[in-house]
Amino acid sequence: MESRSTCDAVVVGGGPAGATAATELARSGLDVVLLDKAGRIKPCGGAVPPRLIRDFDIPDDQIVARVRSARIVSPTDREIDMPIENGYVGMVDRDRFDAFLRNRAAGAGADRRTGAFERLERHGDGLVTVHYRDKETGALQSIRTRVVIGADGARSKVALQSMAKAEHVPCVFAYHEIVRSPEGPVRRFAGDRCDVYYQGGLSPDFYGWVFPHGPCTSVGTGTAVKGFSLRDAVGGLRRAAGLEDMETIRREGAPIPLKPRKRWDDGRNVLLAGDAAGVVAPASGGGIYYAMLCGQIAAQASAEFVKTGDAKALATARKRFMKEHGTVFWVLGMMQKFWYTTDKRRERFVTICDDPDVQRLTWEAYMNKRLVRARPGAHLRIFLKDMAHLCGLVAPSRQ
């Protein structure tokens, strides 16, 4: 492979954020290279809301299952069902979905390269050289570019080489096993329902999940507590769901950021997106929609930078994203810090989830990826109920 001399943009990382950024850049007419490691699949429940499917034009063949409800399981094994009214949550397999997004970027005109990012090299002319190791030949390759979008995960090497204090990123480590879905009925499993387990034995500070993907199912958990055995927890979760004897197709683990970074750009010609920018929703761990939106916004900011040469354009990416979603991230972060700390609090949290107002507003917010402001009465009722639980005036149900 011969290195081209210069391009407008290099996107490092071909997950949902990077592939979306590359597609957006290519469609805007820029010369863009998409650099990605082949075969890396991030552990992910795979849930995508209708807004993502609509906004990013996801075809039906990428939706491997349609979830019509969620079941919340408390520390005492109490089960709360949360049906979805007038809609569904789509499920995707990240191996197929990410490949589809990368192929779409190439179809839009992005130059796909398969290899491992090595380092950045600065130049006095304002350009930066991206050095990478080609997967097929093993040779070190390089390309000069005007802007780099680092979409290479929570432990972003691009960030480490360009941002101050980039190593200080709080993360949950997530692990899941993709197993063959049962063909017949199995206890505590349904092919059109997501199950979420709030139990300290499965995660001391997060939750465990069983998310159906049609012919296969994601069974996983996560934690920031060092020494906690995620494999043992997933084994226990499989037994609880009746999936212990199902074939294991693959196992995956990766760090998941807990909150957005305070800065996404280096003030020169590097911008972060996706997990590298920290855009995974606290409490829920949902990240695909936010990653793709972040990639789109990062591409638009980068295109403006290429056009004007003004590095201030890069800083607009974080400002735009946080203006629309910062409040949601703050609220979810506070929820996780309070409700996920002890099984006593988890039990109360599950009791709150049994409330019809909570369920309705939760699904509306999730499906549309924005806080619901049109139901002041419901918000007031939820606030009063939450305060009652916080003050211990309501005992958690034992049904």
Image (cartoon, rainbow, N blue to C red):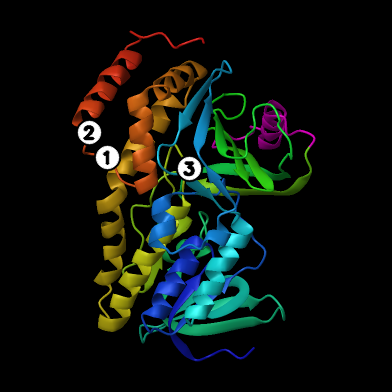
Q: Are marks 3 and 2 in contact (CB under 8 Å)?
A: no
Of mark 3 and mark 1, the one earlier in the sequence is 3
Q: Where is residue 279 in the image (x, y as percent from the top left)?
A: 41, 52
Q: Mark 3 points at which residue?
A: 285
Could you say which quadrant of the image residue 291 lies in? bottom left
Residues shaded magenta = 223-245
10 Å crowding of disc 3: few (<14), some (14-19), many (20+): many
Q: 90 above or below 235?
A: below
Q: Is residue 224 part of the magenta span, yes or no?
A: yes
The relative height of residue 269 versus residue 255 in the rendered view (above or below) is below
Q: Can residue 271 be seen in this view?
A: yes
Q: What residue type is labelled 3?
A: Gly
User: Residue 372 shows which numbered tag?
Assistant: 1
The amino acid beneath tag 1 is Val
Marks counted in the figure total: 3
Instruction: Residue at 22% x, 24% y: name it.
Output: 380
